[in-house]
Amino acid sequence: MPSAAQAQDADMRLRKLEAEVTALQRKVFPDGGTKYFTPEVNTAPAQPAQTIGTPSTSVVTDILARLDALENQLTQLTARSEENSNKINKLQAQLEAMTAERAAATSASSEPVGVMPLPGNSSSAAAKPTATQPVAAAPSQQRVDAVKAIVKPSTDDAGDDEYTYGYRLWDAGFFPEAEQQLALFLKKYPSHWRTSYGRNLLGRAYLDDNKPREAAPYFLENYQSDKQGVRAPDSLLYLAESMIKMGDTNRACIALAEFGDTYPALATGRLKQQYDTNRSSVTCK
C-alpha cells in the first residue's frame, strides 16, 4: 500500500511538471518550433515486468529521483529567464535616468569653452551668454586656423557630409567642435544611415574630452535604440568604459555582462581586445 501511494503521488507530480514544461516551452518558442529541452537525467535500464499488482519499491524510488532532477532543472531554467529579464529592465531604467539627466544638463549648459562656431551652425554662433551662463573663452587664432583647415566635404549626401566633417574634427583632436558638429548632424538627420555611427562617435568625443557622464547617455541610447545597429556593440563597450571612469562598478559590470550575452561572436572577434581590457579594469561579482 505505501508503494502504491508513492506511485500515485509520483504520477501527479509528473503531470504537473509536464504542464509547466509545456507552458515554458510555449513562452521560449512562441513560433511553435519543434525544439525542446531534453532532461539531463540518467534513465535507468528497463525493469522486468512485475508479476504482482503493485509497483516495486525500487521502481518508485527511481521515479521519485527522476522527478527531483526534473524539478531542479525547471527551477534553474526559470531563474535564468527571470535574471535576463531583470538585466534588461535595469538597462532600460538607466537609459531613462541618463536621458533625463542629459536633457537637464543641456538646458542649463552653455557653449563649451574654446569652441569655434562651425560653418552652417548659425544658432550656435548667435548664442549669447545669460546671467547664469559663463562667458565662453574665445579660441586662439591658432585653433581657429587649424579648424578652418579641416575641409567639410560636399557630396550628394548632405547627411553623410555632416557626419564626415564631425569625424574629421574628432580625428584631429578638436573634441568640443566635434561634439557640436555631431550633435548638429543627429538633430538634422535622426534617421540617416549614419545615425548609429554618429551617436557612437559623439559619445566617444565626450569620452575623449574627459566627460564620461555626458558620453554615457549617447552610448546607452545607441545600443537600446537598435541593438543590431552597426555601432551598437561598440557603444555598449564604451558605456562600460564610461561607467568605469565614473567609478560606477555595478553599471559597468551590467554593460559587460550584457555585451557578452548579446554579442558572443564579437567578444571573441573584432572587439575582443577592448572587451578584455574593460573586464580587466573592473572586478565583477
Image (cartoon, helix red, strand yellow):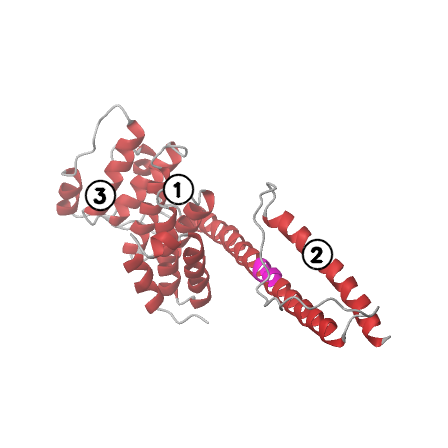
Span of residues in magenta: 77-82
Residue at 29% x, 27% y: name it.
158
Indicate which disc, 1 or 2, sits on the residue closer to the N terminus.
2
- The location of residue 46, given as percent across then percent down, is 65, 66
Q: CA distance from mark 1 to mark 3?
A: 23 Å
The residue positioned farthest toward the top in the image shown: 156
Q: What amino acid is found at the position of numbered circle 3 in the picture?
A: Leu
Q: Secondary structure at mark 3?
A: helix
For the residues bearing labels 1 and 2, Cβ distance under 8 angstroms: no
Quadrant of image for the N terminus:
bottom right
| Residue under label 2 | 18
55 on left or right of 254: right
Foreground residue, 60 or 270?
A: 60
Above or below, comparing residue 109 to residue 161 in the picture: below
Amino acid at the residue labelled 2: Glu
Q: Is residue 166 left or right of residue 7?
A: left
Q: Is residue 80 above or below residue 143?
A: below
Crowdedness near tag 3: few (<14), some (14–19) or many (≥20) residues, C-alpha within 10 Å: many
- CA–CA distance in space, label 2 to label 3: 62 Å
Query: Could you say which quadrant of the image residue 193 lies in?
Result: top left
Residue at 70% x, 56% y: name it. Answer: 18
Image disc number at residue 169: 3
Verify whether residue 80 appears in magenta: yes
* Helix, strand or loop under label 2: helix
In this view of the protein, can residue 128 be seen by the observer? no
Which mark is on residue 229? 1
